[in-house]
Amino acid sequence: MKSLAKHRRHPAAVLVVIMLGLLLTGGLYAAANTATEARSVEADALLIEEGKRLFLEGCSSCHGLAGQGSDNGPSLIGVGAAAVDFQVGTGRMPLANFGAQAPSKAVEYSDEDIKAMAAFVASLAPGPSIPSAADLDYSGVDTARGGELFRANCSQCHQAAGRGGALSNGQYAPNLMKTSPEHIWEAMLTGPQQMPVFADTTLPPQDKKEIISYIESLRASDDPGGWALGRFGPVTEGLFVWIGGMLLAVILAIWIGAKVR
Amino acid sequence: MSTEQISGFEKKGASAATYVDERVHSNSWLSRNLNKVFPDHWSFMLGEIALYSFVVVLLSGVYLTLFYKPSVVEVIYDGPYIPLKGVTISEAYDSALAISFEVRGGLLMRQIHHWSALFFVVAIAVHMFRVFFTGAFRKPRELNWVVGMTLALMALAAGFTGYSLPDDLLSGTGLRIIEGIILAIPVIGTWLSFFVFGGEFPGVDIISRLYGIHILLVPGIIVALITVHLMMVWTQKHTQFPGPGRTDKNVVGYPLMPVYMAKAGGFFFLIFGLITIIAGIVQINPIWIFGPYTPDQVSAGTQPDWYIGWLDGALRLMPSVEWIIFGYTISLNVFIPTVVLPGLLVTAAIIYPWLEAWATGDKKEHHVLDRPRNAPTRTALGVMAITFYVVLWIGGGNDIIAVGFDLSINFMIWFLRFALIILPALAFIITKRICLSLQRRDREKLLHGRETGRILRLPTGEFIEVHEPVNSEEKALLESKPDTKPLPEPPETDSAGVRNPKYKSGRRAAGLSRFLYRDTIEKPTEAEMHHGEQAVEAEDEFEAPLLEREEAMHIAHDGSVLAKPAVDAPESATDTEDGGSDQS
């Protein structure tokens, strides 16, 4: 070190240090960069390849070999990763049989498989992507405003308590009480089945977060009045007052009207 | 009780009664009324259920008025319910939320009020079933039937005005439908709507108007009508079911004091308790979930309370029919199911007592009730009406049912449209057949008595079943069947050949009378009864030696099961074993 320190006031020293610094940072950057890029490209290609394999196996019979669609299923070009994550992630796809609407059922694929198929479909054409953790972070947003947005945009089909409602010809808006925030976000973005698309231009991400926050508050809230009868409103209440109320009252009447023998 | 045994408490009571009697002469009035006799049957308490639930409605309603504000002035919500914080709402909704979340006992009171209101209407409906199916509306009680019908309609009015007060999304949507119904009334609809709402819907007047109607006008009418209803029951005396010694000229039962005072008092607390328990554990009308009302929003699955549900169903099942006359739209698709249909049904229900009286030509007083089976056509008509109502009611909840049971709502509508015509007709036929079959069984019982299940084999090889005569109580019940005959066809001309001026209306009455009374199972005649009694006696004669033998062998005989005494057991066990080894 002493010999090196001896030259520290040499006129060329500054130059050498700068040169060394540039070399080191540039070299490191380049090395790191090429490494990640190569890994990521390789991984993406593998993921898409895997997704394509799964797609050809499980989806192409209806959606076409290149996702172009057929008489039995719509084109998937441009629907984006979000649509795949929603449809397969809630068990709607693969379809068990043709009906009025694809029902949500047990999920057939693992998370990795779903991500792979999503990557493949996203590679066909640009489309809405799967939301990041930051997109879904609804902590601290205005839940009450979400309620107003929910009542204005969602409750006419999904019912004020999010319990779902009937649409024409056997179609329906499903119950939201078991849907994850990620899937709600994707549904709003992609408009699956009968649902309209709520793109970020009409319903900004902040609004989406507020709506999700409101749905979560509905899910989490206890019913202060007791047993909620499914939160369906007057239909179940009317049924209850006849069966649970009047029947008991008549039994009481028979009891008190009984002759003492 | 001798005079020495009178306690100090009784002495004080007696002197107090004397003090009051010397001033207002109350003793004779009291003894007359407190000893009034009421007949005993559980179904006579259904009206009481309605009365008691109305008392509960009144009590809980008074509590709610202390906190409710009938105003649509807009305020910013700043209460404890976070998912509404900062939302602009009406003062009415704000106060309803405050009752639910801030007022002590408020939510319980709201739920007691709402549940007891639903209960009130249910009890009225069931009470009406009892009155209708037993023919309690016949002379002299036709007017009380009308009072009862009016009470039922007032209960609906009370319910609907109350449903609209919290100004939440559900109640506002209900009001919107009412506005649509008013608008559909031809010619005056638009004017009437502006009159009711004080301008364009929803306006700022409707909540305070409904409030006045809900807490003052309708309850006032209900209290007045209940008084009339009960006074008529009091002066006309209560009807009774047929039984030994019961006629149209007497009442068999217990005195009001003390039996019915105790029963009725206890029953009030039972009903109050039942409603309170339900209100304590089952949530009703969670207004905080529905959110505030704004005319541009509507939630899926919006329904009225159950008693209006059938009209909602009628509205949903009605095909789309619209006339445009001189540029004016006549919305028959709304007007027929929500104005014409209930109008016709209520009118039919109100005039039914007179229709039946006209068809029977019967001017007598009836204090002994009909058993429903003994008026098969009336019972069938009642069940038909209930079926019609229930189909409409299901129609009112068709979207909830479609979602809950994975059905197509379009399919449900078409199914219910057909069901609305087919099922009531089926219900009529089936009910009438069941009634006639029950009549047939009654006739059999009267003729031959009860089947005992004991089979005898006669020496000739013939098998017979032993019958037992019915007891006197049951016999009186079975013999109560009235033999109403259809009215005869009126003569077209009298003996002198002069045209009968009442021929046409007489024919109509005779036609209706045939419809009501043609089908019946005749009661057995004297001769048939005698024959039946002889048959039972003959059976007894056949059985007598067998019974003597059983008695001699100490075999217990409880009417249906023959049980051997325990001492015989080992012997019979050996028998079986022997039998078993023989076969193997």
Image: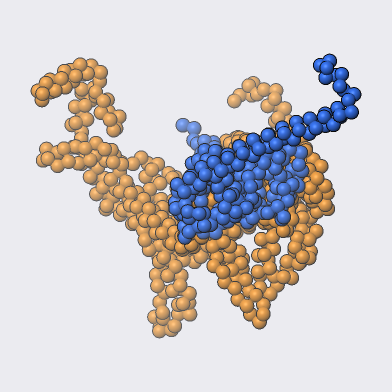
Chain colours: A blue, B orange
Q: Is residue B24 left or right of residue B370?
A: right
Q: Would you say B370 lies left or right of B455 here?
A: right
Give how far across and how far down residue B25 sits, in percent. Answer: 72, 42
Q: Nearer the viewer, residue A113 or B109?
A: A113
Judge whether residue B519 can be spotted in this image: yes
**Nearer the observer, B156 or B440:** B156
Residue lying at the far bottom in this picture: please name it. B497
What residue is rendered at 48% in x and 55% in y?
A64
Report the quarter where the N terminus of chain A lies: top right
Q: Please name whichever residue, B242 or B66, is drawn nearer the observer in this view of the structure.
A: B66
Q: Is residue B110 left or right of residue B88?
A: left
Return the x and y of residue B227 as percentages of the image width and height.
Answer: 67, 50
> x, y (%) of residue B505?
48, 74
How many tags in the picture? 0
Figure check: A100 above or below B511:
above
Compared with B58, B13 (above or below) is above
Which is nearer the eye, A18 or A173?
A18
Residue A22, x across and y down, in percent: 78, 34
Can see residue B307?
Answer: no
Question: Looking at the image, which residue is at 16% across and 18% down?
Answer: B574
Residue positioned 36% across, 40% down in the render: B471
What residue appears at the point 83 percent right and 49 percent down from the top-left corner? B75
